[in-house]
Amino acid sequence: MASSVSSTVPQKWRRPVRQRSRLVRRTGPAHSRVEFAHPSEQEFARFLDYYRIRWQYEPVSFPIAWEAMRVAEMFTPDFYLPEHDLYIELTTMKQSLVTPKNRKLRLVRELYPELNVRLLYRKDYQQLLAKAGYGALEVIDLRKEDIGEILISPVELETRIRSLGRKISRDYRGQSLVVVGVLKGVTFFLADLARQIKVPFVLDYVDLQRFAGALPQDRVRIVRDIDYPIEGRHVLLVEDIINTGFTVDYVLGELRRRQPASLEVATLLDRPLRRLVKIPLKYVGFQIPNDYVVGYGLDYRELYRNLPFICTLRASVLDLPARLESPRQA
């Protein structure tokens, strides 16, 4: 008995069947650990790894046809993307392959209407990129080729910032906060973090001017001060990235003179290997290597702030011989 009519197939017959692992090694990039059935699948897995999209290869099969109460045919999607709850079936432009896959897909959608599954052609790669966050790029002279390695994906940012917000909310339960952001790279991080903080708070900003060639203690000045009085208040200073620590140390010194009840630091990114001044960091999003990074508010010559992930730039973009590095990442 083979049927494509959902109402005639008992629910107990439609149980997905978990497939055996295709893992062949435990080290190296994820796309090199799995035994793929076709080179195009490994190519797609490499693509997913590059954009830090988690995946599983052929994790389950879905029965779609039966004979004499036994499964006669199953559909096994090539990939499952858990962060998007999406199954992906790859195909080619050969009509001989597309037609039977489309038939199977129709059966799957009829029998398992709650399943999120897509048949993916090469032309659909860009649509998947957009789902991963890359489709938001609209800045003039901003090219995909500029991007080196994606260090922190949009999903990782969202997950970690939600966790930081919960921790801050627990630590300040029953109290109120003054949240002070250091302009302007912190804008994206601070906006998302603020939405996750569940205790009462007021929001304020400082803006700094930096100077090259002076002594460390003279390399920064406040050009826009906070408006809100902080004496006797709990203050959280929020930064996008901390390197040597000179900038944050200066701001902390200025804020301590105003006698807050407490003063803590939250930073999205931390480079401890570059630290020259000891900074008390209570909330840290990610520790990163010494590479120059952009995205999610961080810029290179005022570009790339709107990237929804954090990544390195290719050496050709940085123009190393004549590089004008931002002091914030020096």
Image (cartoon, grey):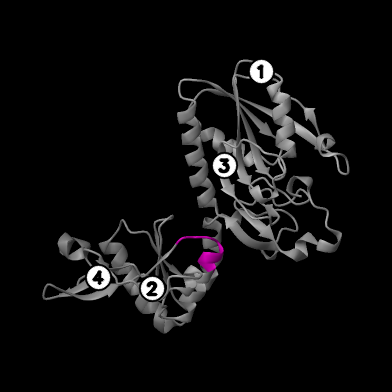
Mark 1 element type: loop
Residue type, mark 3 in image: Val
Identified by mark 4, the residue type is Ile
Residue wearing tag 4: 64
Which mark sits nearer the N-terminus, 1 or 3? 1
Measure how far apart labels 1 and 4 are at the Cα level. 69 Å
Q: Amino acid at mark 2?
A: Leu
308 sits left or right of 244 in the view: left
Q: Can you say whether 151 is above or below 62 in the image? A: above
Q: Quadrant of residue 311?
A: bottom right
Q: Residue at x 17, y 65 (%)?
A: 13
On whether residue 53 falls in the magenta region, the answer is: yes
Q: How packed is label 3: few (under 14 Cα within 10 Å), some, or many (20 or more)?
A: some
Where does label 1 land, which residue? 259
* Range drawn in magenta: 47-54
* Mark 4 surroundings within 10 Å by alpha-carbon count, few (fewer than 14), some (14 through 19), many (20 or more): many
Q: The residue tagged with tag 4: helix, strand or loop?
A: strand
Q: Quadrant of residue 75?
A: bottom left
Q: Earlier in the sequence, mark 3 or mark 4?
A: 4
- Give the residue at mark 2: 23
Q: Position of residue 125 (x, y in %)?
A: 53, 67
Percent across and percent down for residue 113 are: 30, 58
> Residue reaching furthest left?
68
- Cα distance, mark 3 to mark 4? 48 Å
| In-front residue for pair 47/114 | 47
